[in-house]
């Protein structure tokens, strides 16, 4: 089964729209902190730091879900205005 990829301009538009929301920016910052912590921990043989970075993952998921809820509300509002 062949999976079709969306056009690049569509993907760029989605990324730019998602980065306009503060919750997505916070989630991206949390991902960067987690990746940096894991990298630092593994590079310096510090298992506690590497595993401690995994504690950031629930906040990343929550921030993403909150941002997604905002997208749903915005889309619903746009549909109401269109009707």
Image (cartoon, rainbow, N blue to C red):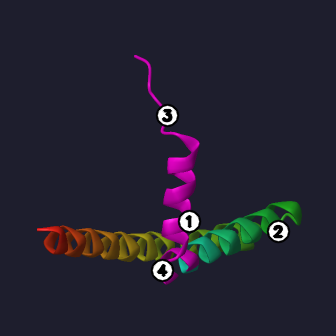
Residue at which label 4 appears? 23
Q: Quadrant of the C terminus?
A: bottom left
Residue 58, given in percent of the width and then of the height, sits at 46, 72
Instruction: Identify which residue, 56 or 4, lies in the foreground.
Output: 4
10 Å crowding of disc 4: few (<14), some (14-19), many (20+): many
Q: Which mark is residue 40?
A: 2
Q: Earlier in the sequence, mark 4 or mark 2?
A: 4
Splitting the image into 4 quarters, where does residue 65 fall? bottom left
Residue at which label 1 appears? 16
Splitting the image into 4 quarters, where does residue 62 fall? bottom left
Q: Earlier in the sequence, mark 1 or mark 2?
A: 1
Instruction: Identify which residue, 47 or 60, lies in the foreground.
Output: 60
Residue 79, given in percent of the width and then of the height, sits at 18, 67
Secondary element at image label 1: helix
10 Å crowding of disc 1: few (<14), some (14-19), many (20+): few
Instruction: Identify which residue, 48 or 58, lies in the foreground.
Output: 58
Task: Tally the marks.
Answer: 4
Q: Quadrant of the N terminus?
A: top left
Cα–Cα gap, marks 4 and 1:
13 Å
Residue at which label 3 appears? 5
Circle nearer the viewer, 4 or 3: 3
Circle nearer the viewer, 3 or 2: 3
Q: Residue furthest left?
A: 83
Cα–Cα gap, marks 1 and 3:
18 Å
Does 9 lie within the magenta span?
yes
Q: Residue furthest top?
A: 1
Q: Earlier in the sequence, mark 4 or mark 1?
A: 1
Magenta segment: 1-25
On screen, 14 above or below 33?
above
């Amino acid at each position: 089964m062949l999976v079709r990829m969306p056009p690049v301009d569509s993907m760029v538009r989605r990324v730019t729209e998602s980065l306009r929301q503060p919750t997505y920016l916070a989630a991206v910052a949390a991902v960067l902190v987690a990746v940096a912590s894991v990298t630092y921990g593994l590079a310096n043989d510090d298992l506690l730091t590497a595993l401690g970075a995994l504690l950031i993952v629930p906040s990343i998921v929550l921030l993403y879900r909150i941002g997604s809820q905002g997208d749903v509300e915005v889309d619903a509002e746009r549909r109401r205005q269109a009707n």
